[in-house]
Image (spheres, rainbow, N blue to C red):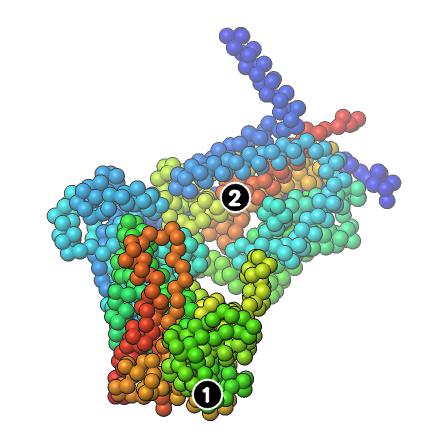
């Protein structure tokens, strides 16, 4: 083959190639002529037609943003709505001098002089013919002030737009969250075309969690626009699909009672329906005004909010972790019964302190001199510490840890808003992994003792406490806490409810054990020696509860407090858990008042008022 | 006066010398630079006078010019020996893309090995090189057996690209392969046979190979008004832009269709519509003629080439370049479906520019590495 290739006829091949190249050239000329003729047809023959299409009116497709879904409480009260508002918008191509116009607007106090630079950037980023919102939510006087100057400010106009409004303001802010302008981070998580034309997006809590459902689907309209891009006439439209309305599990009346009861304090109230896991109250104080955040707060105001020592932006119900104190006792007692380590009727002596064998350290009872001989029921009703020091020692940390975890402690409850804290249930493994010094890695018997009264490393969120209380009320059945009852379709008016998801039962099947604990908790409120007898004795329904106080160990060194305030912040946290009515529990509640000193004195009345409000219909 | 003429003569001489030492072809280079300049002007207008985007395009041109310079230094003999290896590496990379590649715009086209690039670009040169290598020492016109081998060689990379899916590129690569086989002088009966079987294959492609979006584009071509918001939008807006440009155009930076952003993909696949709108029929014809000039020079280089490999490769590169221009302009003027082929050397975007100028580098190498043959 190699030989024959040497013999191949190069001249003939080159002639063949040239022949083919000529055919190719003819083909090229032919195809090029087709394109050139086509160009001539478009640009000469049909010029008039296309020129009219181009220079006269043109079709622009523009997005129709969907209306954001409303948010209702469980009884249909509106918690978040859309209200028309006036906003100032600017179209760059119609403004002769953008800088001068912005300066004039600042002079008229219609925009903040501090924002001039960021507004200029905003304008530069948009297309010349876009209408850019430069100030949301004008007051009536501002509208009037602008109206006078309007003829001298071409390209700036006032438009009515829908903005978010929360009628109950800060009372529900920590549950609902708020909406705000779409920023660079948001852009990475959303479908940009679906948000074409949308100005607001959910930033936190429910507004963020259910953003896809609340937002809806964008629509499009075809409008005839003139040569400068201005809309002349609507041609056709594919309407937007409005977002779904949310029906929450919250009861706004109980929520308002909880919010007001916490007024002037730092704390949280969470109430749950034990039969479903539906969250009825979700309050955290202090709070913030979601309306002003949704308009777009000035940087100075936002910083003030962030730097407030009372942390109004901090969602205590979801993220605050507190030692549960004595409110943990019913669960520890149940553990004692479940593991068969105690006889509830066997009285133990409380002499005011407890010592581990071979150790002289005294773990003191809150009551000097002690409670004398107490049964398990007495120890819960009177909140005897010594009884639980002893029980904790018998149970040991391993069994306590595993039992507390069954009640959802030490782990996120799975509520449908983000940012939940898991709290902490300590164990030997945890200690080994979390401490640096070798000597600290060991679990000490004394740490078991104080875990029995909810002190030491144990930490719970108010949500977890309410969840654990709901489990006691439901005698071991448990449901994932949720704030969403269902969706309502605004177009059809059809409501669709969501089944709450049941979690694994805690596995205590002996009803007598539940009876013992629940009746002891009832004695707390309605027994002769109950710690919260003052709150519970005259209640119009049967109820069970448990008070708690948690020591505040440290105040951060770098925080500045005057002495009076420092003293206030060193006081114990007040806690209370409760549920009612006994025979058919419908509400379980947990209350935490930071530095409230007395669980039965400060927190219990709040719990009672919330339960009374929620049970108003059956009373 | 004489000194001035002498100077000019001298500087011309210097220029020729410089070009020759760099293995560049002055005629081809002039055409390419003319296209690049017109292209930059159009692009500047199409991107809304954004200097940054223009600069990044110029940077890409710099990279592409480097690729051209490098290719021009490689002698055709060396290139011929490298051909099967280039082809093999290309096929392996195409296979890797399907296994590990990055997905962009619903298609898996990118390979990320330090830098992100499309291996299908390698194949634009790799396939004609491979075919030219297969045919270079055989008796031409090729036998039926040899043609079959060539068809298999075409089929492997094209099928790998078609399933990415990238219809535009696979069509162009088929055409570049067909160009080699055609230039090798295959008989007329084979050509007509191929055309007949293509007609038969069309319905098969339609039902078994084409994606929905590709079918929609063909249907929209036949009736653009059927989907004015979706696929038909491109063609309608593009025709309005070109048609309203008239004989002399609306003037640079004054095309309302492009400037008001009615025209989609105006800096990439539809940039020819910006040229048509702003420079009118005269401008569109001018750039078209410059393209034809470059193609013509390529064919002349091919015809003057000294060996079969160089002839076939140079011819294929030139014809493929024309196919690019034709498919894009026909697409933008509504003669062909929107298949996603950029306007060569003008549309924004890096990889195709590098491949194109590398191809021209090969043409220049063929033209400038001439051996003294005894006639």
Q: Secondary structure at mark 2?
A: loop
Residue B236 in view? no
Chain for mark 2? B
| Left or right: A271 in relation to B358 | left
Chain for mark 1? A
| Left or right: A526 in relation to B56 | left
> Residue drawn at (44%, 80%), measured in percent from left and top?
A350
Compared to residue A62, the image places residue B371 above or below, namely: above
> Residue drawn at (60%, 18%), measured in percent from left and top?
B14
Q: Nearer the viewer, mark 1 or mark 2?
A: 1
Where does label 1 land, which residue?
A: A347
> Residue drawn at (42%, 76%), measured in percent from left and top?
A352
| Left or right: A374 in relation to B171 | left
Compared to residue A240, the image places residue A157 above or below, namely: above
| Quarter of the C terminus of chain B within the rendering | top right
Mark 1 and mark 2, same subunit?
A: no
Q: Position of residue A472 (x, y in %)?
A: 43, 83
Q: Position of residue A71 (x, y in %)?
A: 31, 71
Residue B67 in view? yes
How busy is the neighbourhood of tag 2: few (under 14 within 10 Å), some, or many (20 plus)?
some
Q: Position of residue A242 (x, y in %)?
A: 33, 68
How busy is the neighbourhood of tag 1: few (under 14 within 10 Å), some, or many (20 plus)?
some
Compared to residue B172, the image places residue A273 above or below, namely: below
Q: Say which of A360 and A54 sits in front.
A: A360
| Left or right: B333 in relation to A148 | right
Residue B7: name its quadrant: top right
Where does label 2 land, which residue?
A: B349
Q: Position of residue A553 (x, y in %)?
A: 41, 62
> Residue drawn at (32%, 57%), measured in percent from left and top?
A566
């Amino acid at each position: 083959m190699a030989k024959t290739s040497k013999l191949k006829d190069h001249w003939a091949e080159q002639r063949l190639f040239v022949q083919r190249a000529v055919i190719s050239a003819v083909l090229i000329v032919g195809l090029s002529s087709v394109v050139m003729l086509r160009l001539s047809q478009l640009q000469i023959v049909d010029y008039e037609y296309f020129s009219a299409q181009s220079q006269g009116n043109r079709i622009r497709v523009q997005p129709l943003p969907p209306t954001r879904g409303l948010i209702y409480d469980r009884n249909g009260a509106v918690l978040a709505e859309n209200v028309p508002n006036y906003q100032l918008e600017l179209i760059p191509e119609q403004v002769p001098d953008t800088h001068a116009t912005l300066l004039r607007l600042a002079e008229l106090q219609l925009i903040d002089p501090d924002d001039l630079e960021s507004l200029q950037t905003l304008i530069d980023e948009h297309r010349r013919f876009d209408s850019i919102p430069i100030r949301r939510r004008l007051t009536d006087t501002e509208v009037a002030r602008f109206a006078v100057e309007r003829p001298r400010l071409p390209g700036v106009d006032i438009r009515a737009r829908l903005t978010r409004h929360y009628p109950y303001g800060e009372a529900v802010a920590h549950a609902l969250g708020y909406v705000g302008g779409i920023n660079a981070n948001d852009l990475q998580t959303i479908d940009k075309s679906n948000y074409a034309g949308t100005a607001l997006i959910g930033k936190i809590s429910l507004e963020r969690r259910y953003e896809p459902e609340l937002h809806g689907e964008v629509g499009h309209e075809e409008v005839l626009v003139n040569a400068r891009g201005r809309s002349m006439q609507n041609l056709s439209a594919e309407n937007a699909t409005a977002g779904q309305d949310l029906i929450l599990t919250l009861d706004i009346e109980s929520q308002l009672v909880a919010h007001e009861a916490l007024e002037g304090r730092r704390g949280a109230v969470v109430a749950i329906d034990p039969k479903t896991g539906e969250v009825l109250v979700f309050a955290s104080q202090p709070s913030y005004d979601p309306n002003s955040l949704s308009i777009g707060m000035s940087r100075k105001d936002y910083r003030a909010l962030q730097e407030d020592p009372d942390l109004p932006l901090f969602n205590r119900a979801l993220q605050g972790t507190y030692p549960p104190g004595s409110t943990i006792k019913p669960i520890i007692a149940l553990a004692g019964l479940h593991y068969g380590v105690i006889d509830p009727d066997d009285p133990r002596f409380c002499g005011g302190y407890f010592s581990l064998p071979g150790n002289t350290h005294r773990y003191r009872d809150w009551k000097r001199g002690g409670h004398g001989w107490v049964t398990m029921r007495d120890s819960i009703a009177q909140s005897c510490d010594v009884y639980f020091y002893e029980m904790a020692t018998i149970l040991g940390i391993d069994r306590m840890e595993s039992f507390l975890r069954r009640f959802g402690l030490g782990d996120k409850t799975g509520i449908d808003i983000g940012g939940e804290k898991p709290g902490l249930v300590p164990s030997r493994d945890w200690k080994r992994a979390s401490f640096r010094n070798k000597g600290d890695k060991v679990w000490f018997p004394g740490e078991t003792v104080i875990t029995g009264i909810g002190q030491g490393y144990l930490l719970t969120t108010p949500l977890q406490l309410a969840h654990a209380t709901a489990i006691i009320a439901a005698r071991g059945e448990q449901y994932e806490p949720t704030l969403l009852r269902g969706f309502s379709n605004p177009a059809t008016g059809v409501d669709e409810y969501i089944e709450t998801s049941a979690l694994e039962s805690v596995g205590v099947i002996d009803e007598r054990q539940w009876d013992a604990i629940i009746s002891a908790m009832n004695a707390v409120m309605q027994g002769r020696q109950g710690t919260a007898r003052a709150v519970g004795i005259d209640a119009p329904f049967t109820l069970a509860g448990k008070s708690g106080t948690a020591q505040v160990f440290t105040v951060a060194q770098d925080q500045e407090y005057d002495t009076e305030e420092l003293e206030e912040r060193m006081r114990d946290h007040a806690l209370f858990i409760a549920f009612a009515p006994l025979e058919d529990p419908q509400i379980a509640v947990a209350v935490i008042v930071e530095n409230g000193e007395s669980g039965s004195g400060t927190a219990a009345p709040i719990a009672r008022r919330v339960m009374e409000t929620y049970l108003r219909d059956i009373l | 006066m004489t000194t001035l003429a002498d100077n000019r003569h001298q500087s011309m001489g210097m220029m020729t010398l410089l070009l020759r030492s760099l293995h560049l072809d002055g005629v081809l280079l002039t055409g390419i630079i003319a296209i690049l300049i017109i292209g930059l002007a159009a692009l500047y207008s199409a991107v809304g006078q954004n200097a940054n985007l223009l600069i990044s395009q110029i940077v890409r041109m710099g990279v592409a010019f480097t690729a051209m310079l490098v290719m021009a230094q490689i002698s055709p003999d060396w290139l011929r020996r490298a051909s099967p290896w280039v082809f093999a590496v290309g096929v392996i990379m195409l296979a890797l893309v399907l296994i590990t590649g990055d997905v962009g715009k619903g298609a898996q086209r990118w390979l990320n090995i330090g830098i992100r690039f499309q291996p299908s670009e390698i194949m634009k040169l790799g396939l004609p090189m491979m075919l030219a290598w297969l045919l270079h020492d055989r008796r031409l016109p090729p036998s039926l057996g040899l043609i079959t081998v060539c068809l298999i060689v075409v089929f492997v990379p094209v099928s790998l690209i078609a399933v990415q899916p990238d219809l535009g590129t696979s069509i162009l690569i088929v055409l570049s392969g067909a160009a080699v086989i055609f230039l090798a002088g295959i008989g007329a009966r084979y050509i007509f046979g191929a055309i007949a079987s293509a007609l038969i294959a069309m319905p098969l492609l339609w039902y078994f190979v084409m994606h929905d979006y590709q079918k929609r584009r063909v249907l929209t071509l036949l009736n653009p008004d059927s989907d004015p918001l979706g696929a038909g939008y491109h063609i309608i807006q593009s025709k309005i832009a070109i048609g309203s440009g008239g004989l002399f155009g609306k003037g640079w930076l004054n095309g309302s269709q492009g400037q008001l952003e009615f025209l989609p993909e105006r800096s990439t696949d539809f940039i020819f519509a910006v040229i048509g709108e702003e420079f009118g029929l005269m401008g569109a014809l001018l750039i078209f003629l410059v393209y034809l000039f470059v193609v013509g020079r390529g064919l002349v280089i091919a015809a003057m080439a000294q060996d079969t490999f160089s002839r076939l490769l140079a011819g294929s590169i030139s014809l493929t370049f024309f196919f690019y221009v034709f498919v894009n302009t026909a697409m933008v003027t509504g003669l062909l479906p929107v298949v996603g082929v950029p306007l060569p050397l003008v549309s924004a975007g890096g990889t195709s520019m590098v491949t194109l100028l590398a191809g021209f580098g090969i043409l220049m190498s063929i033209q400038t590495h001439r051996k003294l043959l005894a006639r």
